[in-house]
Amino acid sequence: MPTIAVDAMGGDNAPEEVVKGVAQVSLETDIQSTLVGDEAQIQAVLNSVPYNPAHIGIQHTFEAIGMGDNAGDAVRRKRKASILVATRLVADGQADAVVTAGNTGAAVLACAQHLKTIRGVRKAALASVYPRQTEYPGQDQLALLLDVGATVRCDAIELVQFALMGSAYARRISKIPSPRVALLNMGTEETKGGEVLTRAYRRLKRFSGINFVGNIEGNDLAKGKADVIVCEGLLGNVVLKMLEGLAEVVVDLAGTARRENWRWKLGFLMLASGFGGLRDLTDYTAYGGAPVLGFEHLLIKLHGRSNARAVENAVKVAAKTVRDGVTREIAAHIEQL
């Protein structure tokens, strides 16, 4: 089974929720996890919950990078920070993938500093899944959006590589034989969006190894037109934060209306299963985190507020990426390009 290095000190709820999530994984699977962080704090949490010690190791380090720290400065100053130590375990062959809920910038820099880039990849991409409508039976309820923050600006080749990496990830993890890939643009026409997007469109259209469906606009993001949506990191990050905010607003408004008006309360009781489904669909803890793609090993980045359930799912997804050869699939696609 794969060994997953878990940054025990990363995230708003670390180390308690991180350690509890790994403890649950140890009871349910044969996945080996190495918790990286303050050993005394980690062991104290483990002692408070059931766990299988045969599936959990601890790598002690006393430093951690906070969520509000400047990523570049922190990575330079805190050489023994938990996210850096966890990434070095992978680089040294002692683990196969990394999971963290900590500082996103520090996580990406840790990968760039210690992990080898897949041959030919020019920039790494942070990908994220989000809920959307489906258009046909069996289509995954989650779409993959990349990049959402590892880059700011890209050229056409880099967008094409994002498309190939996202397609490979969706094929392996979501089990979609031929994922629909699209560019996020201001219009569906080939010439929309300026020179970079136009060149990327033409390259993707010519590439036979990908199911490119053209440009999609913002109002198509919640539909099933594409399984993988490609954009620059600046735009992707804004879109992702907007989607998260809208989901929270919808659920909050529904709860407020139900409490304040008996007619609404009656209506919500009749639609209880539907709103339960909405909560499940917008629950980021079930999605397993966002992969950083482009390196020979994967890092799965969790939401900073992640709880034990989110950590548990992220560790399982990380192990699945190793077992299913996601990085090998990406390397093969890049080689074709």
Image (tube, grey):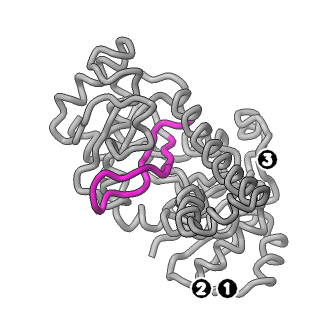
Number of disc labels: 3
Q: Amino acid at mark 3?
A: Gly
Tell whether position 315 is magenta. no
Give the quadrant of the C terminus. Answer: top left
Please say whether residue 106 is visible from this viewpoint. Answer: yes
> Which residue is painted at 36% across and 59% down in the image?
174
Label 3, secondary structure: give it. Answer: loop
CA neighbours of label 1 inside 10 A, class few (<14), some (14 to 19), many (20+): some
Name the mark on residue 332: none
Query: What is the x, y in percent for residue 294?
Result: 43, 42
The residue under label 2 is 27
Query: What is the x, y in percent for residue 99?
Result: 59, 59
Q: Is residue 294 left or right of residue 261?
A: left
Find residue 190 and report its image quarter. Answer: top left
The residue under label 3 is 66
The residue under label 1 is 51
Please report the bounds of the magenta region as a residue range: 126-148
